[in-house]
Amino acid sequence: MTLHPALALSGALVALSACAADRIAPPPRPAPEAATLAAVQRLAPHPCERAIAGVLTGVGIPGDSISAITVEERREMDGDQLLGYEAWVWRTGQPGSVVVSLDAICVPYQVYAREGARLPSR
């Protein structure tokens, strides 16, 4: 059975809109709550920790709900130029992760949820 191109496109758009429902760009950037900043500093010390904690505060993720964080570099294909960072945040008792995307100077430009995670403020 062959799917009509218009149906395939509409299915793709539905899938994309479902993903966009848990994406905020640009993300809120308030001053981080002390407990959230402390959790980020403890779990993933990084030059962007204050910006990461501010985004998490802005979307309503408290520090005591964070179980793990990994911060990864994003680089050009040849590996020479740093493009920015992705902070992957896992929450206790929640599926998936929340990802904070930052540029090379730690300015956040989006936050989104993956693999069943939800942004609390959405």
Image (tube, rainbow, N blue to C red):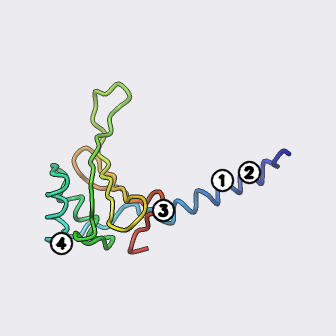
Residue 14 picture location, percent across and down = 64, 60
Alpha carbon of mark 4 to alpha carbon of mark 2: how far? 44 Å
Alpha carbon of mark 2 to alpha carbon of mark 3: how far? 23 Å
**Labels 2 & 1 near each other (Cβ < 8 A):** yes
Q: Which mark is residue 33?
A: 4
In which quarter of the view is residue 99 placed?
A: bottom left
**Labels 2, 3: front one:** 3
Alpha carbon of mark 4 to alpha carbon of mark 1: how far? 38 Å
State the residue position of label 3.
Answer: 116
**Labels 1 & 3 near each other (Cβ < 8 A):** no
Residue at 26% x, 66% y is 29
Alpha carbon of mark 3 to alpha carbon of mark 4: how far? 25 Å
Q: Is residue 5 left or right of residue 54?
A: right
Earlier-in-chain disc, 4 versus 1: 1
Residue 59 picture location, percent across and down = 33, 70
**Labels 1, 3: front one:** 3
Q: Nearer the viewer, residue 101 or 68?
A: 68
**Amino acid type at image mark 4:** Glu
Q: Is residue 5 left or right of residue 37?
A: right
Residue at 43% x, 64% y is 117
Earlier-in-chain disc, 3 versus 4: 4
In which quarter of the view is residue 60 placed?
A: bottom left
Earlier-in-chain disc, 2 versus 3: 2
**Labels 4 & 1 near each other (Cβ < 8 A):** no
Question: Label 2's element?
Answer: helix
Q: Which mark is residue 8?
A: 2
**Amino acid type at image mark 3:** Gly
Height in image: 78 above or below 115?
A: above
Q: Nearer the viewer, residue 2 or 13?
A: 2
Question: Label 4's element?
Answer: loop
Question: Label 3's element?
Answer: loop
